[in-house]
Amino acid sequence: MSREVRVAVFRPDDDRLENAVELLDSLGSTPVPDPMLAVEPTDATPEDAEYVVLTSKTGVELLDESGWTPGESILCCIGSATADAARDAGWKVDRVPEEYSSSGLVELLADEVGNSTVEVARSDHGSQVLLDGLRDAGADVHETVLYRLVRPEGSGKSTELAAAGDLEAALFTSSLTVEHFLDAADARGIRDDAIVGLNDAIVGAIGEPTRETAESHGIDVDVVPETATFDELACTVVETAAPTYHE
């Protein structure tokens, strides 16, 4: 197929974006890297608790750099990337839900955390579902904000491509990437046109919460992968945008 498949990717400007670009290249598509998230550490560390929940590779790396360790706490990680980063730090990972989501972890822990202390350490944009679910299960829950997620200055070139009808696909990896994309489009005065452009493209969302956020803003979501990983999201979206395009 001769049609160029331009795919917007919004990962933070670090190894995650580099790896994403490499993957999209290998699939025969044209990556459009447009980081929509930048990390601002708070330098906070989790309080002592019987359970510690970490929800991202970024949080693990910040804690590892600070010298924090889980000690005797039961360490729970959402997602394979988070768990792998924790193991790379030399920590024992005790719980990883089959479903890589807040609700998946709540379901896993609901029968065991009653009357226990649970420390949730994550970004400032974490889902309330996790805190509420653990509290409903009888846990004493405390949250520590490890880092803030902000929109990088100058982001948004993908919004211009979308508005011009020059994007074939977009990969949203969190609700915040959706919101920051729309903020960047708003700043350029092209929000409505960018949404129209996305709706003429193939839009992928990494999970149901991201899909719900996109659809609440009028963005049609075409792909939600069975497993909430970037690789599966990218592969499925590229194949949907251009079947048999890659070799």
Image: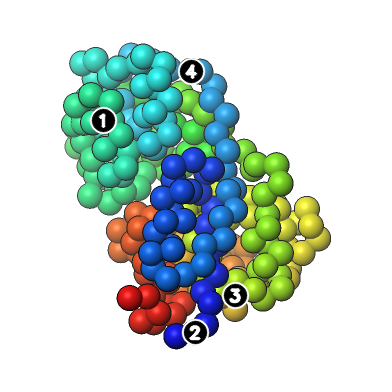
* Proximity of marks 4 and 1: CB atoms separated by less than 8 Å: no
Cα–Cα gap, marks 3 and 1: 40 Å
Q: Quadrant of residue 192?
A: bottom right
Residue annotated with mark 1: 88
Cα–Cα gap, marks 4 and 1: 21 Å
* Proximity of marks 4 and 3: CB atoms separated by less than 8 Å: no
Q: Earlier in the sequence, mark 4 or mark 3?
A: 4
Q: Which residue is painted at 58% across and 38% down in the image? A: 38
Amino acid tagged 4: Ala
Which of label 4 and label 1 is nearer to you? 1
Which of label 2 and label 4 is nearer to you? 2
Cα–Cα gap, marks 3 and 2: 22 Å
Q: Quadrant of residue 231?
A: bottom left
Q: Earlier in the sequence, mark 2 or mark 4?
A: 2
Amino acid tagged 3: Asn
Q: Position of residue 150 (x, y in %)?
A: 62, 38
Q: Earlier in the sequence, mark 4 or mark 1?
A: 4
